[in-house]
Amino acid sequence: MKKYYLAYGSNLNKGQMRMRCPGAVPVGTAEIKGYQLLFKGSRTGSYLTIEKKKGAVVPVGVWEVDERHERYLDIYEGYPSFYYKKDMKVTLKETQQEIDAFVYIMHEERPLGIPSEFYVRVCEAGYEDFGFNAKYIRAAIKASQGGM
């Protein structure tokens, strides 16, 4: 069964997704309204997540995935212990079609942190792949530093 997955971090990177989920198809872009990007994590590093924030918006790449891809993503995202899944309705910018999709969100109690240069570069390449402005990543770094 096909599903839609909303990516906002390293899974925007089309090269990485080709390796991680062969056959997953990028179908467009959308926005998650009322959320902001932040870097949070654990001893192994800090990664992007989204958290509720009034007036904020997070651009996302929309992927069509199947059950096998979702299992691969679950493992990669450390589901359910590191990230949990949330179902959302979003509007595809390209077609104005409203879709049901899922997104991974890091457990909120995780501490804010500063990402590695490598991880930031991978995310920035994904932003480029989907035509997004990297200002969202820079704002997430700044907000995460400021909240520490």
Image (cartoon, helix red, strand yellow):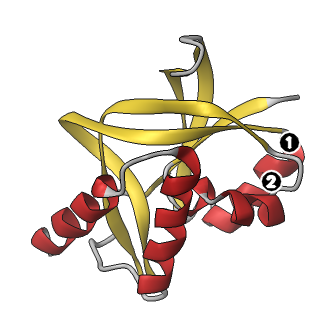
Disc 1, SS: helix
User: Closer to the camera, 72 or 124?
Assistant: 124
Looking at the image, which residue is at 62% across and 31% down? Answer: 28
User: Closer to the camera, 43 or 48?
Assistant: 48
Looking at the image, which residue is at 51% across and 55% down? Answer: 128
Residue 99 x %, y %: 61, 18
> Can you tell which quarter of the image residue 38 is in?
bottom left
Outermost residue to the bottom: 43
Q: Is residue 63 visible?
A: yes
> According to the image, label 1 marks what residue?
67
How far is mark 2 from mark 1, CA to CA? 6 Å
> According to the image, label 2 marks what residue?
71
Looking at the image, which residue is at 50% across and 58% down? Answer: 9
Q: Is residue 109 visible?
A: no
- Left or right of 128 on screen, residue 71: right
Looking at the image, which residue is at 43% across and 88% down? Answer: 43
> Can you tell which quarter of the image residue 6 is in?
top right
Disc 2, SS: helix
The answer to whether marks 2 and 1 mark residues whose Cβ atoms lie closer than 8 Å is yes
Q: Is residue 133 above or below residue 116?
A: above
Quadrant showing the N terminus: top right
> Can you tell which quarter of the image residue 49 is in?
bottom left
Residue 46 x %, y %: 40, 76
Residue 76 x %, y %: 69, 66
Quadrant showing the C terminus: bottom left
Q: Amino acid at mark 2?
A: Arg
Q: Amino acid at mark 1?
A: Glu
